[in-house]
Amino acid sequence: MNGTGSRILAGVLVPDTPLVQQALYRALRESEPYLFNHVVRSWLFAAQIGQLRNIDHDAEVVAVGALLHDLTLNQRFNGPRRFEIESADLARAFARQGGVDERRAQLIWDSVALNSTPSIGLYKEAQVALCTTGICLDVVGLQYEIIPAAEIASIVREFLRLDMKRRMTRCFCHIAETRPETTYDIRPRFR
């Protein structure tokens, strides 16, 4: 893991660096419990897929991208742009403040900005593709078969879904109602 510390979380080996710890804390502080659990599951799924497929990647970039991908999905968000872009900008700023170089910060931005666009994200760098896969696996079951069912169950037991589908739908509806200009193309991407 890039020569850094690591730990086991819900049965998955993950990086345990100050940057990852700060991203985890930021996600916890900024998110409702269902959303926090979603971003952690997304991270764990991405990490597990990277390990199972032996994909060469920067595990810290994957962690930060997955953990911060939904920062602006809360009632306080009023930005003028798509929530993915607003979250990507916040995640990149967070990474820069944590001493991440520009290349890695851009990978984090891409991971967040493209998280709901698998038709692009899956064809980008390994970090972006892993984030996209982990996030989409948690939301819509994309590539569910990659991870053994017992390992998925262990992750979900540790980080419960907490009625995520209904709550996330309500959140997206709120964004569509209050800022429709930022959501005109969301539905076609999830068909």
Image (cartoon, helix red, strand yellow):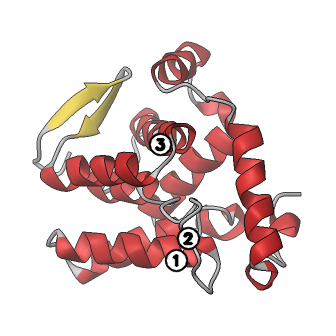
Q: Which residue is mark 3?
A: 36
Residue 39 versus residue 65 in the image, above or below: above
Residue 41 versus residue 114 in the image, above or below: above
Evaluate whether residue 6 shows in this view: yes
First in sequence: mark 3 vs mark 1:
3
CB-based contact (under 8 Å), mark 3 and mark 2: no
First in sequence: mark 1 vs mark 2:
2
Badge 2 amino acid:
Phe
Secondary structure under tag 3 reads helix
> Where's residue 187, x and y in %?
86, 65
Residue 160 versus residue 42 in the image, above or below: above
Evaluate whether residue 141 shows in this view: no
Q: CA distance from mark 1 to mark 2?
A: 9 Å
Q: Which residue is mark 2?
A: 77
> Where's residue 107, x and y in %?
39, 72
Q: CA distance from mark 3 to mark 1?
A: 18 Å
